[in-house]
Image (cartoon, rainbow, N blue to C red):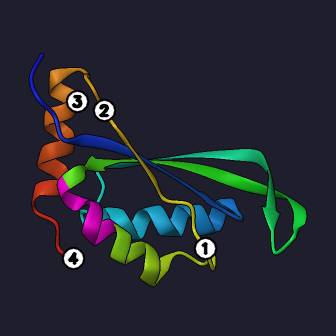
Amino acid sequence: MPHTDAIVVLTTLASPNEAHQFVRTLLERRLIACGTLLPGAKSLYRWQGQIAEEQEVVVLLKTRSARLDTLRAAFTELHPYKVPELLALPVEAGLEQYLGWINAETTLALA
């Protein structure tokens, strides 16, 4: 199995419109190859000493670990949450053509 530096980054946003715009901007900057929006999620979490419950959109971002520092900076700039979720999960293996596509789409990053 060929080595890959592909990662999947998880985040959440408050609405489908926010998620769509966020992913479009990351695509335009070539920081990600793909963003998948999964609306209808309900997040329960502890925030400032209380339990909160919110409807959210889960977003799966496909990119490479080499783009992670720049992606982290983009989150700081673009993500509307005070403390955005950014969890990067390594990809152990995948379809060679798909991994190559992720690499090609994020190699010429503009940001």
Classify mark 3: residues with Cα within 10 Å, few (<14), some (14-19) or many (20+): few
Q: At 64% from the left edge and 66% from the top edge, which residue is drawn?
A: 17
Q: Find disc 4 in the rendering and name its residue.
A: 111
Q: For marks 2 and 3, give the one nearer the viewer.
A: 2
SS for dot 4: loop
Query: Does 110 sit left or right of 31 as displayed?
Result: left
**Which image quadrant is residue 25 in?**
bottom left
Measuring from the top left, give residue 98's x and y in whole percent: 22, 30
The amino acid type, in three-letter code, at marker 1 is Val
Give the CA separation, mark 1 to mark 4: 22 Å
Q: Find disc 1 in the rendering and name its residue.
A: 83
Q: Which residues are magenta?
A: 66-71
Q: For marks 2 and 4, give the one nearer the viewer.
A: 2
Give the CA separation, mark 3 to mark 4: 23 Å
The amino acid type, in three-letter code, at marker 2 is Val
Q: Residue furthest top?
A: 1
Give the CA separation, mark 3 to mark 1: 31 Å
Give the CA separation, mark 2 to mark 1: 25 Å
Q: For marks 3 and 1, give the one nearer the viewer.
A: 1
In the rendered view, would you say 101 is above or below 24? above
